[in-house]
Image: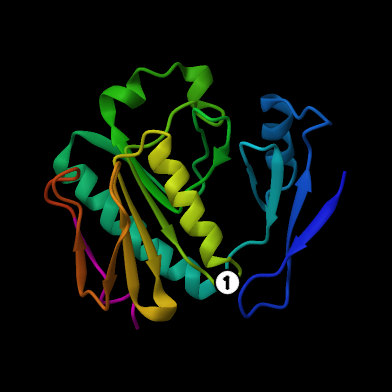
Amino acid sequence: MAKVPILAEHVNVPRVMLNVESVGLSPEQFFRLCCDNPELRLELTAQKELIVMSPTNPKTGMLNAEITCQLVNWAKRDGRGVAFDSNAGFTLPNGAKRAPDGSWMLRTRWEALTPKQTARFAPVCPDFVLELWSPSEIFKELQSKMSEYIANGAQLGFLIYPRKQQVYIYRPNQAPQCMDHPVSVSGDPELPGFTLDLTEIWK
């Protein structure tokens, strides 16, 4: 397997991408690989490239916790769907196995899955996905990932870029919208009533 290091912006530790196409990594094997390496974040692209990432730094973890808290609180009030944190993995229709930093889907879609499906990387794309850039990631790759979510069924996506205090909003059949230094960003109409307060994120 060829190992190709990918250097992220302003970080000394490289991410690693492995081409596992010829190995034939099965869904069960990938799940076991994730379980056997809990200290790593693993994703599998549609092109059968295994992406190996180290855990995020404490500040990114703190920011992601704030975002997740806001999303979960709204989901409980709204009642129509379920929210997920950054540990939830999904198998997209194109075969990629992704774990967005935050996500939400209608409860009817979630409850249509079998217990076996929800015990692994559930074969479904969330209705809403959120990615939070960290210094260990390449921004252009996150942009591509957001486009992938939309192409595979997501109705709304937020890409948060704290370094420049920007939020990119993704929707089907639309070019991404960039907001500079927003105080908050609304999820309407896809997530009615959800407003992500960015005050803590920009600190």
Q: Is residue 39 visible?
A: no
Look at the image and say whether residue 196 sits in the magenta stretch.
yes
Q: Position of residue 106 (x, y in %)?
A: 27, 31
The answer to which image quadrant residue 131 occupies is: bottom left
Q: Which residue sits at x=34%, y=61%?
A: 67
Look at the image and say whether residue 65 sits in the magenta stretch.
no
Tally of numbered tags: 1
| Secondary structure state at the residue bearing disc 1 | loop
View extreme (right): residue: 1
Q: Which residue sits at x=40%, y=62%?
A: 65
- Figure check: 195 above or below 91: below
Residue position marked by numbered label 1 in the rendering? 57
Q: Main secondary structure of the magenta part?
A: loop
Q: Position of residue 104 (x, y in %)?
A: 32, 41
- Figure check: 51 above or below 125: below
Q: Which residue sits at x=57%, y=28%?
A: 120
Give the residue type at disc 1. Answer: Asn
Q: Which residues are magenta?
A: 195-203
What is the quadrant of the C terminus in the image?
Answer: bottom left
Describe residue 55's horizontal placement relative to residue 59 as left or right.
right
